[in-house]
């Protein structure tokens, strides 16, 4: 087995194993060794569903992350990008904070290529020129049965990144950039 350590997004040391997992090496994380981190998705543009355990305790499952990367691909171009796992952890924490850990998350938008981002900008969709969607650090969601105002307020309370509220389109933008709101 080959192992290496690297600084991951300025948060914790992660050891990468070439046997299919990332391990969080920061003892302050405090997760139980084999607790499964599960997410349930429904993609509103492709109609696809994904029910997946992406992490066990402090260890990310690389095969599961790959499946999630393909699932959250740019639905306009089919391009796949490596998603920041902090987005997944944010979604897991959010559904827990909503007391709906098994809730299905409706995905409005995952990864966007620069082409898709430009297309949306030129067609009046009000997307940011340097959107974190293009770095696979953002996701637009709703949770059926949870008002988007409650989803927004709960996400804001987590203080884990940016939270945008789109009342007219009935979704919330989440990202793992700096803490901010709109």
Image: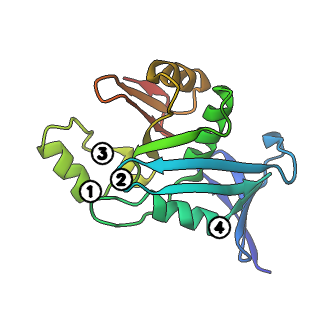
Quadrant in which the C terminus appears = top left
Residue 23 sits in which quadrant? bottom right
Which mark is nearer the camera, 2 or 4? 4
Location of the N terminus by quadrant is: bottom right
Does 117 sit left or right of 42 as displayed?
Answer: left
Q: Which residue is mark 4?
A: 62
| C-alpha gap between disc 2 and disc 4 | 21 Å
Instruction: Characterize the local packing of mark 2: few (<14), some (14-19) or many (20 or more) Cα atoms within 10 angstroms.
Output: some
Q: Which residue is mark 3?
A: 130
Which residue is the site of mark 2? 134
| Mark 3 to mark 4 CA distance (whole Å) | 27 Å
Q: Nearer the viewer, mark 2 or mark 3?
A: 2
The residue closer to the viewer here, 130 or 19, is 19
Question: Disc 1, disc 2: CB below 8 Å?
Answer: yes
Could you tell me which residue is drawn at 85 percent across and 54 percent down? 34
Please, is residue 150 above or below residue 25 in the view?
above
Gap between marks 1 and 4 measured at Cα: 25 Å
Mark 2 to mark 3: distance in Å?
7 Å
Identified at 53% across, 49% down, the residue is: 41
Tag 3: Cα neighbours inside 10 Å, few (<14), some, or many (≥20)?
few
Using the numbered discs, state the Cα–Cα distance from disc 3 to disc 1 in whole angstroms: 9 Å
Quick check: 113 above or below 2? above
Left/right of residue 18 with respect to residue 72 in the rendered view: right
Between 135 and 119, the one nearer to me in the picture: 119
Check disc 1: other Cα within 10 Å, few if <14, some if 14-19, many if 20+.
some
Question: Which callout, 2 or 4, points at the residue further toward the start of the chain?
Answer: 4
Cβ atoms under marks 1 and 4 closer than 8 Å: no
Mark seen at residue 114: 1
Secondary structure at numbered mark 3 = loop
Cα separation between marks 1 and 2 = 6 Å
Of the numbered discs 3 and 4, the one sitting upstream in the chain is 4
């Amino acid at each position: 087995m080959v192992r290496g350590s690297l600084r991951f997004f300025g948060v914790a040391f992660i050891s990468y194993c070439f046997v299919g997992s990332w391990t969080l090496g920061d003892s302050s994380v405090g997760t139980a060794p084999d607790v499964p981190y599960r997410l349930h998705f429904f993609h509103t543009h492709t109609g696809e569903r994904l029910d997946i355990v992406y992490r066990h305790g402090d260890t990310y499952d690389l095969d599961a992350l790959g499946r999630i990367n393909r699932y959250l691909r740019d639905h306009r171009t089919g391009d796949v990008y490596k998603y920041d796992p902090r987005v997944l952890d944010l979604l897991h924490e959010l559904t827990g904070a909503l007391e709906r850990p098994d809730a299905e998350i409706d995905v409005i938008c995952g990864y966007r290529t620069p082409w898709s981002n430009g297309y949306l900008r030129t067609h009046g969709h009000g997307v940011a020129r340097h959107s974190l969607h293009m770095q696979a650090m953002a996701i637009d969601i709703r949770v059926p049965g949870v008002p988007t105002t409650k989803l927004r307020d709960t996400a804001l309370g987590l203080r884990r990144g940016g939270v945008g509220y789109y009342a007219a389109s009935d979704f919330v933008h989440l990202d793992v950039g700096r803490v901010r709101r709109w």
